[in-house]
Amino acid sequence: MQKKKLILIGGTMGIGKTTLGQYLVEKRLDHAVFLDGDWCWCMHPWVFNDENKAMVMRNIQFLLNAFIANTTLENIVFVWVMHQQSIIDDLLNGLNGDFDVYSFSLVASEAELTTRFSQDIDAGTRDQAALPGAIARLSMYDAVDSIKIDVTGKDYSMNADAIVNQLR
């Protein structure tokens, strides 16, 4: 078996991380697993504080470590809003095992993000009030040490091609 690949896909809300990550695992990568960091935040009421941030990070690291240790997996796709390098660094500091890290950030024009976000609003999966924050985070990805994938005008299969080509 080849060395495991930990594929991190960051990007602001609504940019297409989940769709792309699921597509990669279902259609493009063998022996793969998908984890969305938002699953570890799924609580009601949603409380953003230091205690919950630490808990979420531990839970994500626990799951990723289990995937890394699993001998049947080669590709681990993790998606989350990783708009600061410190988030990625903290995440990686809690992982064990032998793996290569591939860090990607999905970026887009403001118009593209607004279009994608609006589709989610129409589908009932996003709230209009979150759009300004998502737009504000776009520029933060410039400072993240990652391969930038500009999704403007591209569908998830084209974006998957860009990622898979970097994994070779």
Image (spheres, rainbow, N blue to C red):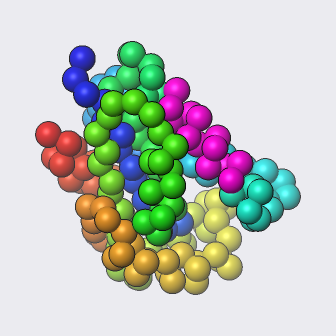
Is residue 129 within the magenta segment? no
In the displayed structure, 58 sits above or below 87; it is above
Is residue 61 within the magenta segment? yes
81 and 120: which is toward the camera: 81
- The magenta-colored residue range is 54-66
Q: Residue at x 24, y 17 (%)?
A: 1
Q: Is residue 81 visible?
A: yes
Q: Residue at x 43, y 66 (%)?
A: 85
Where residue 31 appears, x then y in whole percent?
Answer: 34, 23
On the picture, is 120 further left or further right than 7? right
On the picture, is 13 further left or further right than 154? right
Q: Residue at x 39, y 49 (%)?
A: 8
In the displayed structure, 156 sits above or below 116; it is above
Where residue 72 appears, x then y in whole percent?
Answer: 38, 16
165 and 116: which is toward the camera: 165
On the picture, is 16 further left or further right than 118? left
- Dominant SS of magenta comes to helix
Q: Is residue 119 visible?
A: no
